[in-house]
Amino acid sequence: MIEIKNLVKRFGEVKALNDLSFTVKDGVAFGLLGRNGAGKTTCIRIIMEIFAADSGSVRIRGIGENEKQGNIRFGYLPEERGLYQKRKISEQMIYIGMLRGLSKTEAIDRMNLLLKELEAEEYLNRKLDTLSKGNQQKIQLAIALINDPDIVILDEPFSGLDPVNAQLLKNIVRKQADSGKTVIFSSHQMPQVEEFCDDICIINKGTAVLSGNLDTIKRSYPRNTLLVETGLPPTEDVLTSVKSRMEDHVSSATIAQKCYAITLKDDSARGALFEVFTALGQTPEKFIIKEPSLEEIFVEKVGDPTEDEKREEAVA
């Protein structure tokens, strides 16, 4: 577990972190989210003791930053990559493994295991600059995990990955969390975070504006909008009939792709709505409560991105 309490960090006149607090539990995938410049990278660097906070505290598995963290192993995949483009992958992995405390034999064993899991064994004796961006990313992940870390920190890990390799990476990182490790995951790609992360913290201007279990956060929002699929193409005639028969209970009703989106004034009217569709010969095949997406929650908390941020996130 990592406990962040009241972190403050200034760079000159800029306050990068402003009384930031949140907790990362072991055995879950934790999403650290925020716009560019929100303070995510600063927080990560303080956790890893790359530099110190001006005030506040970080405790990792009960150990504070002023105490010895000797047996705590970190695995870090930074957004800015730093491997040697002209050196063989095997040389780099063994070298970095030994830098992180492994014997040469241990480093070779871990390298072979990780490259097999990542389906990247064929690149063992290739130079990094001969690989695609996605395959370079897989090597970067393997190196982040080379020392079997206790704390895994991944910054934009899906950059450059196609859907198949993105799923492969998710499976490997999920395995890390399921084994009880602490996994922190930072990304601009909200659908990936939503699918992958158990808990989240949204940072805005150096302060946590929302944190907790993602499913619990979603359930805290109003649950009065229903998505209704009947197996038939939705029509305006059916929509008009539903609104007419439910006018005292419906606040809005629209057609959304292959379904009807009905917002009720009162949750207790769900049964009556089902009966109305059935009476119209449109028995629902799916009758789903619409929860807000992570992107909708994120925008609510920090606002829409600027045009510059949209361009940066598109590139990422």
Image: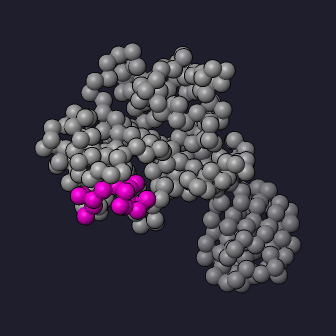
* Quadrant containing the N terminus in the rendered view: top left
Residue found at x 40% / y 43%: 82
Identify the residue at image location x=83%, y=60%.
Answer: 251
Q: Using the rendered image of the protein, determine whether residue 28 is visible from the camera's viewpoint.
A: no
Is 272 or 100 nearer to us in this picture?
100
Q: Which residues are magenta?
A: 122-139
Residue drawn 61% across the image and 52% down it: 313
Q: Is 248 on the left or on the right of 177, as rendered?
A: right
Identify the image quadrant of residue 9: top right
Q: Mainly helix, strand or loop, the magenta region?
A: helix
Q: Position of residue 89 (x, y in %)?
A: 27, 52
Q: Position of residue 70 (x, y in %)?
A: 28, 24
Nearest to the observer: residue 284 or residue 55? 55
In the displayed structure, would residue 122 be above or below residue 278? above
User: In this view of the protein, can residue 258 be seen by the observer?
Assistant: yes
Residue 123: say if magenta.
Answer: yes
Residue positioned 81% across, 79% down in the render: 236
Q: Position of residue 204 (x, y in %)?
A: 65, 36
Q: Is residue 232 left or right of residue 69?
A: right
Q: Nearer the viewer, residue 189 or 51?
A: 51
Q: Residue furthest front?
A: 86
- When asked about the image quadrant of residue 107, the answer is top left
Give the quadrant of residue 28: top left
User: Magenta stretch: residue 59 in it?
Assistant: no
Q: Position of residue 41 (x, y in %)?
A: 52, 35
Colour setup of the view: one colour
Q: Nearer the viewer, residue 34 or 314?
A: 314
- For the image, the number of numbered tags is 0
